[in-house]
């Protein structure tokens, strides 16, 4: 359990740093991205933002031992109460635990966006205004407090060993290490249909109204397609990264606690207990307005598409008549 429990407080970068092959691949990706941004896009890489991301990663590394200490015991305790025991020497047990963990990841990630208490921690990951592999480094310091560790407990309770559950989690984290980039366009369509790709994850990090609250997937994008949160990256809608209320600070401490500050302010300003409860545990923003805006934008796009097709048809008919 010692190696496995180490992963409990893990992040894409800590797994990558421990594995020389992954580290080489990651550094190569960083190098390509810097080169591509400078010479192909002719844009600034954003060194200050990248340095802030590294600062956030260092802060999280300090919080990690506490997380491991608390969670390792809890996982073992829950596994002792399991209702079944899956045999992990069977391949199908691994398929089940992978699908189960990815499904739970989707829902936990969705809750992190839709429950203010959890968003206060997860907003850190969305605070970057540029998409690059350093976005991986931006992970909240308060995961233990908001309860993200609850995510995998159902799998342990039904009988998957903590080490197996944690291995699938590590796989998910490693997958996410390469999808935070502008450099990789859309992949072959069957891959885009099934997997969470750089294109899908760019949408997830965007503040454009049409892209809000979309693409929560870990590895399989099929969950978003199934539960109505999928949005394709649109060619004529470039991704505008960052928080709706943009954060430009490059101070890691400010970034790590910014949304907690907003939450405390809103709870303090609320007049009734109901308002206070909503400020702490409700949707962070106006959900109705977001849905209305998205419905309107998508309807307008459909109308524009139909009109363009109609005009093209008229031109073809006129050309044929002449
Ligand atoms: Zn997110
Ligand atoms: Zn991300």
Image (cartoon, rainbow, N blue to C red):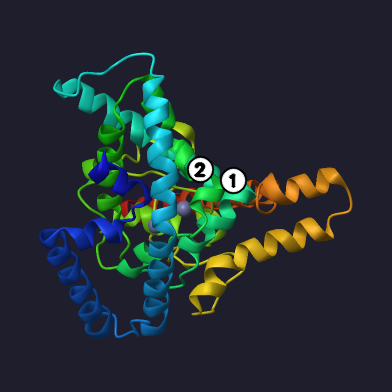
- Left or right side of 259 for 16: left
The residue drawn where x is 68% and y is 54% is 285
Across and down, in percent, residue 42 comes to 29, 85
Spatial separation of the CA atoms under disc 2 and disc 1: 6 Å
Screen quadrant of the C terminus:
bottom left
- The residue that disc 1 covers is 114
**Toward the viewer: 177 or 21?**
21
Q: Give the number of the disc on residue 110.
A: 2
Which residue is most to the right?
Answer: 271
Determine the image quadrant of residue 243: bottom right
Mark 1 residue crowding within 10 angstroms, few (<14) / some (14–19) / many (20+): some
Across and down, in percent, residue 273 comes to 85, 45
Which structural element holds mark 1? helix
- Left or right side of 283 for 7: left
Q: Are marks 2 and 1 in contact (CB under 8 Å)?
A: yes
- Residue 184 seen in the current view: yes
């Amino acid at each position: 359990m010692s190696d496995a429990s180490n992963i409990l407080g893990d992040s894409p970068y800590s797994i990558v740093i421990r594995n020389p092959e992954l580290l080489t691949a990651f550094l190569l990706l960083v190098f390509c991205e810097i080169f591509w941004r400078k010479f192909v896009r002719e844009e600034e890489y954003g060194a200050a933002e990248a340095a802030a991301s590294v600062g956030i990663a260092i802060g999280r590394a300090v919080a990690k031992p506490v997380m491991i200490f608390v969670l390792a015991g809890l996982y073992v305790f829950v596994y002792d109460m399991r209702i079944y025991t899956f045999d992990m020497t069977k391949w199908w047990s691994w398929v089940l635990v992978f699908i189960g963990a990815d499904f739970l990841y989707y829902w936990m990630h969705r809750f992190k966006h839709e429950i203010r208490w959890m968003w206060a921690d997860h907003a850190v990951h969305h605070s970057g205004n540029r998409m690059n592999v350093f976005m991986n480094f931006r992970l909240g310091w308060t995961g233990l407090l908001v309860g993200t560790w609850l995510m995998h407990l159902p799998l342990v309770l039904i009988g998957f060993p903590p080490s197996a559950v944690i291995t699938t989690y590590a796989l998910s984290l490693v997958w996410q290490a390469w999808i935070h980039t502008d450099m990789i366009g859309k992949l072959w369509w069957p891959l885009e249909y099934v997997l969470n790709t750089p294109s899908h994850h760019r949408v997830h990090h965007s503040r454009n109204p049409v892209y809000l609250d979309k693409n929560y997937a870990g590895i399989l994008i099929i969950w978003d397609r199934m539960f109505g949160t999928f949005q394709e990256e649109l060619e004529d809608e470039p991704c505008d990264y960052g928080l709706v209320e943009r954060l430009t600070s490059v101070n890691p401490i400010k970034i790590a606690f910014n949304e907690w500050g907003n939450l405390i302010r809103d709870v303090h300003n609320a007049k009734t207990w109901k308002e206070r409860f909503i400020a702490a545990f409700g949707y962070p923003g106006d959900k109705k307005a977001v849905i209305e805006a998205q419905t309107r934008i998508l309807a307008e796009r459909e109308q524009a598409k139909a009109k363009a097709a109609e005009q093209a048809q008229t031109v073809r008919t006129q050309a044929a008549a002449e």
